Image: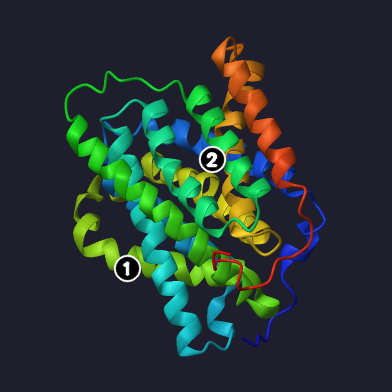
Amino acid sequence: MSTVHPASTEAGVDRVPAPLLFVASGLTQYLGAAIAVGLFAVVPAATLAWLRVAVAAVVLGLWRRPWRTRWTRAELGMAAVFGVVLALMNVSFYVAIDTLPLGTAVAIEFIGPVAVAAVTGRSLRERGAIAVAAVGVVLLAGVSLDAGPGAERGLVAIGIAAACWAGYILLGRRVSLQGGQGGGVTSLAVAMAAGALVLAPFLAGRAGPVLVDARLALLVVAIAVLSSVVPYAIEQVVLRRVTSATFAVLLAMLPATAAVVGAVVLRQWPHGLELVGLALVSVAIVLSSGRRGTPPPGDVTPS
C-alpha cells in the first residue's frame, strides 16, 4: 500500500518494549471500562459497545485520514473483515459482562488467545508460556461459578467473544503488516468504520439517549478513546513486532495490570491466589520475550 501522507507516528513508540506498551493499553482500557459499566443502566450494553466502535472510527478517521491512502481491494477487504470481527468482539463481551461476573467472563474469553498460541506457537517455549499465562489469568480473574440469572446468554456471548478475540489476533497481525507508511493504525481506522457500518442496522436504533444528552455523549467519546482508540492503536504497533503466539501471551498483562491498578489506586492489595496469578503472568512474559525480532508475515501458520 502506498500513501501520500507523512510517516506514521507509530515509529515514535516502536522502540518502547512491548510489555510497557501493554501496561499503557491496560490502564486506558480499564479506565474506559469503569466508565462504561456505569452507563449500562442508561444505554443497552450491546448498543454502548457499538457506539464505542462507531465513535472510535470517527476519531481514528479524522486522525489518520485513510482516504488519502491508495488501497487495493485485498487490503480493504482484509481491513473490513478485521473490523467486523473486532466490533463483534466488543459487542459480545459487553453483552456477556451484563450477565456474568467480570472475572468469569475474562477467564473464559482468554480461551481465544490460548487457542491462537497453541496453534501458532513455533516452540515449546511459546506454548508453555501461554499455558502458564492462562493459569495466571484464571487466578487473577477471580472466577466465580455463581453466574446468576441470564447466565446462558452470557456464556454464549463470551464464547463468541473468545472466538472473535482469536480472530482479532490473527487478522490484526496481517492488517498491521499491510499499512506501509500509513501503518496499521490507518488500516485500523478503516476497520473500525467497516465494523460500525455492518452492525449499525442491528444496534444503532437504541442509541437515542446519547443523541439528546451532551454529558452522556461526552462519556461515550471518552469510552471510545480510552477503550478502543488508544489500546487498539498500541496493539497494532505491537502486532508488527511480535509473533501471534507472543502477542497472545502479552494479553495476559491486561488482567495483571488491573490487579496492580487496584492495589495502587484503590488499595485493593492482591493476596493468596491473586499473588500466585501475578507471578505466573510475569513468568509467562519472561518466557515469551525470549524470542526477539520481527517475525515473518507467515507466523500464523502452525509449525
Q: Residues within 10 Å of mark 1 (few under 14, many from 20)?
A: many
**Which amino acid type is shown beneath numbered disc 2?**
Gln
What residue is shown at x 59% (from left), y 58% (from top)? Answer: 244
In this view, the residue in front, 119 or 185, is 119
- Inter-mark Cα distance, 1 to 2: 23 Å
Which residue is under mark 2? 29
Name the residue carrying label 1: 197
Asked if residue 101 is positioned above or below residue 173 in the image, the reply reads: above
The reply, left or right, for residue 233 in relation to residue 161 is right
Q: Quadrant of the N terminus?
A: bottom right
* Residue at the farthest right position: 15
Q: Examine the rendering and report whether any part of residue 61 can be seen.
A: no
Label placed on residue 11: none
Residue 218 horizontal side relative to residue 238, left or right = left
Does 41 sit above or below residue 203?
Answer: above
- Tell me the residue at 52%/51% (across/down): 118
Numbered disc 1: secondary structure: helix
**Which quadrant of the view contains residue 158?**
top left
